[in-house]
Amino acid sequence: DRRAARQRERQRAKALAEAVEEVVSGVEPKLRAVGGYQGKLGPEIQRFLDFVTAIIAQLPPAIELSRAAWQKDPQVNAFFAAAKDLPLCLSRAPELRDYFEREPLATQAYCIMTSTRAERQVFGIGLQGDMLQRDLAQTSVGFVEPLILAPSPSEAEVRKEALNRALHLFIGFAQAQVAETLGQREGLNHERQIQEVRLRSLRTRSRGLDADGKIRDEILAVEQSLAENAREMEALGGPLMSLDATLEQIRALFATPGDQIHLAHIPLLLDLLGIKLDEAANEKPQAQVNELSLIEFTVGSRRRVITLVRCPREEMLSRAQVVEQVDPFLASQLGIRGL
């Protein structure tokens, strides 16, 4: 009804205002001196939020990270080499451990898991047609550097947190872009100063007794270099980086998030050793094949597989057990019993 629609609109406006303040705080707090900065940034940041919300909506339901799930879920099986690796991975995730310490009654947590898909060429034994062949070139696929982030009480909450994390990731990207522009401007300014000193020196020499055509050619070259410097500086917003220019740069970045954030659906067929299979692998018994449909996102130069996961508390190890698994020698020195 109308009341509910107005309430949703108020919530949307509040969320946008908060997002604008996060961007300004993260990139350049001085932008608050620009009159109407919220209205100027709002439409572009809302476009970014809508773009990322659409991406998050494509994420499949959370999968359970547990030793039991490793036996039957193709994704969990592919992400972890062995079932025994799961408890250690969960227990070494700082955010997840802190969440369970803050929420003693929680039996599980919904999280975002990201990892890097790593492929490398290996040689092994395999079928080439109907013939068993040794030293067959194969592609091994692994998932490394897993991160378990943003633990939340429900899947709906973790999807909201995913939007918040994406916003802060992009704020960091925008901050780097603004810093790069400032660096380019400083470099051009330094180059201009050097060229101006050289030009004054050449003009002084041109009025001396040793003036010749070569000096006039050098003067012309330096003048052309200064003109090109001025054009490059103008393209960056002028010799002084005004707050308005910074705001416009941020608006441009958030207006086109698709230029920097890319989403790819990656279908994979892997055997239980992580070897990539081709379509012919469908002829093998299904129990020997992990058929995956991954979502991989790229922001700038960073590429990660993203998965929503459900982490049971019962899979967590105690701190003593973590020490024992990571460093048995240290555990023995601390008097911690082996598992």
Image: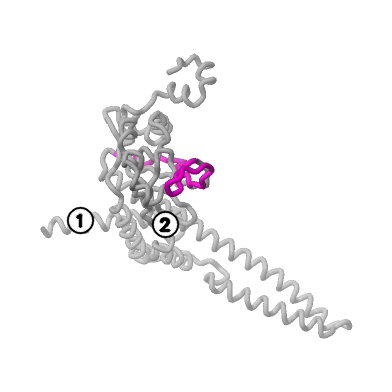
Q: In percent of the image, x 25 and y 45: which residue is there?
A: 156
> With respect to residue 216, does 271 lie above or below?
above
> With respect to residue 153, does 24 lie above or below?
below
Q: Which residues are magenta?
A: 125-152
Nearer the observer, disc 1 or disc 2? Answer: 1
Estimate how packed mark 2 is, as few (under 14), some (14 to 19) or many (20 or more) residues with alpha carbons within 10 Å. Answer: many
Taking the magenta stretch, the answer to whether it contains residue 140 is yes
Cα separation between marks 1 and 2:
24 Å
Mark sitting earlier along the chain (1/2):
1
Estimate how packed mark 1 is, as few (under 14), some (14 to 19) or many (20 or more) residues with alpha carbons within 10 Å. Answer: few
Q: Amino acid at mark 2?
A: Val
In this image, 217 relative to 335: left or right?
right
User: Which residue position holds label 2?
Assistant: 24
Q: Residue furthest right?
A: 209
Quadrant of res 74: top left
Q: Is residue 308 visible?
A: yes
In this image, 220 relative to 42: left or right?
right
The label on residue 64 is none
In this image, 178 relative to 161: left or right?
right
User: Which residue position holds label 1?
Assistant: 8
Q: Position of residue 65 (x, y in %)?
A: 33, 35
Q: Main secondary structure of the magenta part?
A: strand
